[in-house]
Amino acid sequence: MTQLKRKFLLMGKSGAGKTSMRSIVFANYVPRDTERLGATVDVERSHIRFLGDLVLSLWDCGGQDMYMDNFLGAQRDNIFDDVGAMIYVFDVQFLTKNDTKDWNYFRNCVESIAAKSPQAKIFCLFHKMDLIHEAKRDAVRFALPHFLMREGWWRVSQDKTP
């Protein structure tokens, strides 16, 4: 039996919630326990057996500026080579404040994936929507996918489920 290993990147700015999500999904944390997690230093790698023979090589990449700049510079080949999928996590609180640095990091990550692992799937997760005032959530939900389409990053399909 052959084991299939896939590199999976978890990227985004510091504080977006990448490590918290990883801990909830793969380590059975409850959300309130993630408050005690510290910032990720460089890259935390873990291997997770999934669906029998599939092993996810999960790379939780630190989001501090010095790490992101290094991932997109000196470590670009190491980080972005042979990637199966990347989830880029946005903290919607910062996006609503027109934080262009996060969009620029996202754009550079997409360009690096396209150059080094063109077959990789790219996903965006807009996290912490519960922290946006309820009256503004629909506007944020509507604006984010349209911004991505306008920028030409990719097509966004509309989910038809209620």
Image (spheres, rainbow, N blue to C red):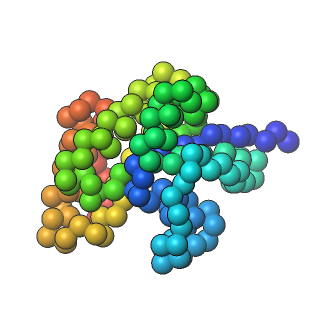
Residue 110 in picture, x, y percent from top left: 41, 32
Q: Residue at x 37, y 37 (%)?
A: 105
Q: Position of residue 3 (x, y in %)?
A: 79, 42
Q: What's the residue at 42%, 53% (across, down)?
A: 14
As drawn, which residue projects farthest toward the right? 1
- The answer to whether one can see residue 57 in this image is yes
Residue at the spot 61% in from the left edge and 71% down from the top edge: 28
Residue nearest the observer in this picture, 160 or 73: 73
For the residue pair 70 and 92, the one nearer the viewer reads as: 70
Q: Is residue 60 visible?
A: no
Q: Quadrant of the C terminus?
A: bottom left
Q: Residue furthest top?
A: 115
Residue 108 higher or lower than 142, as above or below: above
Of residues 131 and 97, the one drawn nearer to the viewer in this rendering = 97
| Position in image of residue 29 (x %, y %) | 58, 73
Q: Quadrant of residue 78?
A: top right
Residue 118 position in % (x across, y down) = 50, 25
Q: Exactly how many numbered labels are in the figure? A: 0
Which is nearer the eye, 118 or 100? 100
Residue 132 higher or lower than 60, as above or below: below
Left or right: where does residue 80 sit relative to residue 135?
Answer: right
The N terminus lies in quadrant: top right
* Residue for point 51% across, 48% down: 62
